[in-house]
Image (spheres, grey):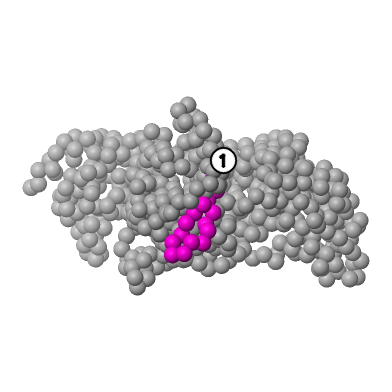
Amino acid sequence: MYCYFGTKLAHAEMPRHLPTPDGFPDTAALAALRAWYEGASSRQAAAHYLADQLGNHLAAGQSARSLIGQIRRQLAHYARQRQRPDLAAPFEGPADQRQRHARAAAQAVEQLRTLPLPMPQISDDIARWLPPRAVRVLRAAEIGTLADLTVRIPRRRQWWTAVPRLGPASARRIEAFFAAHPALTERARALVVAGQRSDVAPWEILHVPQDVDGSAGAFRAPVSGCILGADNDYEAIQAWLALHETPATQRAYRKEAERLILWAIVARGKALSSLTTKDATDYRAFLRKPSPRERWVGPPRPRTAPDWRPFVGNLSARSVAQALAVLSAMFRWLVEQRYVVANPFAGIKVRGSQHTKAVATTHAFTEGEWLLVRAIANGLEWSYGWDALAAQRLRFLLDFGYATGLRISELTQAMLRNVEVDAAGDHWLHVVGKGGKPAKVTLTPLARVALERHLQERGLPISRARWEPATPLVGSLDGSGSGITALRLWEVMRRFFRLAAENLASDHPPLAEKLRRATPHWMRHTHATHALAKGVELSAVRDNLRHASISTTSYRSSGRWVRIPWPGRPTYVRHGRGQSSVAETPRRTAYDARAYGHLAGG
């Protein structure tokens, strides 16, 4: 007989007089599991403590290993039902490392034994309570919390028809959940009363009064010549948005059209098709500083929330110019369709927007700043109370985003099937970039290490031969195996940047201020900035970022680095602060370990 069968861990810590909660393994099953964690094989542990069950398992063609695995899964599920993924973790690790986690598993069992099922709170994330498929669909509609969802349900019948791909079956499950927790419904009704929307509402639920809907707009072209078939401005803009199939492009264009039509109706009291050139120049000033701020400006919120606002702050000159360019293109198309007779935004300029497009260091972290940020990420679990799985995913987002320079949409859409190793042994990631253009991005050593480590953390194989092709590179934490949306990734990264800012505010105020402004796109800028600083050729960085022009990849530091032709070798001239010097850099036409290896993090 094996000594660990008689240890204190296997017997004394398993009180037999305590009642077994529903759904919790019985004493014999827990004893077998403890023995297995202490080093017994599955067959030895099951034969000693679960002889009858083992016999039934073997008769059914199943193994002792599957019996132990069933107990582990039962405990992990029990923990997750109680919103304790940290207590589920000891039961989900690799079997060959079980002895290392024996004490944690024993402690988790004792904690779980007395944990009641939690009651849902209106601020809870929907992933805590709803099925994974419903969660994916709701998040795609920017519904992230029970509060967002409860505002929808009591407001109207067939509420789910406004949520694409939800369907009545999923809707019934959601309604059953709320029926089982009536306090949420009561709170929802209070929210609806207390949080009635202002006259500023998002595009999906915007109700335009008939007198300003554009059906009689001042600059409408004769209806007989219009080829759109639109009766009002909302329908005309909807037709323009439908031209663009890429979701990211459609969202960006909708945002600009939404802001303009709201401003026209609320601030000007006129239809969009009645706007003059004077209105357009006034709108330019409004974009620089939207006011009154309580009506137009607010923190990022789901579009379904009553306190949603069109702006999160003032717009830079470059953002104003981009907005006006989109609106000018929209009106130009409306003129071509003979819906309106003129484009009020034609020829409008924005002062300060003509600077060279550049990777600015104000939107990138220096090497020293990056090391500080990455050090905070290494301690998220024990220093800041993050769930282990969430912390591991965050570190992967930092390392992989930094090492590849991917856009948010590219990162959230990437799957293992998109990873390629060519004949030369180089690793690539195939992506669909801006405008739906297919491209491939080099996977540096740091990117490959980050990916392999994260796959291990998720319990997935690192051998390409064993990969499931449809596995997303960035996974959801709900155990469904699905990916996450670009909006969710943005929220996760912003949460981390704000946390880092709080912890660096006293010792590093400038970095803390940068972190308060940082977005996931800063990883792309940091990637390019560090690659150029390490001597990677400007053309190689441009190709990896997939910029159409090399000028877009210009590097800004204390001065500006401009690539100039030089026979036989690349040379850069530095301009800035009254100085001009010529410096030869080592030729590096591709990414390698020297460019990023020293910043790999933990």
x, y percent for residue 115 = 38, 36
In the orientation shown, which residue stands out farthest toward the left?
1
Give the residue at mark 1: 577
Instruction: Assess whether residue 569 is covered by the magenta stretch.
Output: yes
Res 489 visible: no
- Secondary structure at numbered mark 1: loop
* Residue toward you, 532 or 186: 532
Q: Amino acid at mark 1?
A: Arg
Q: Which residue is found at the position 67% from the left and 44% from the top?
A: 316
Q: Which residue is found at the position 16% from the left and 49% from the top?
A: 40
Q: Which residue is found at the position 73% from the left and 56% from the top?
A: 325
Query: In this image, 482 relative to 277: left or right?
Result: left
Q: Which residue is found at the position 22% from the left and 64% from the top?
A: 59
Query: In this image, 590 relative to 134: left or right?
Result: left
x, y percent for residue 261 = 78, 51
Q: With respect to residue 479, does 508 lie above or below? A: above
Query: In this image, 234 relative to 408: left or right?
Result: right
Q: With respect to residue 381, does 573 lie above or below? A: below
x, y percent for residue 34 = 21, 44
User: Callout 1: few (<14), some (14-19), or many (20+) C-alpha neighbours within 10 Å?
Assistant: few
Q: Quadrant of the C terminus?
A: top left
Residue 232: quadrant of the picture: bottom right
- Over which residues does the magenta segment extend? 559-573
* Residue toward you, 238 or 249: 249
Number of numbered discs on residues: 1
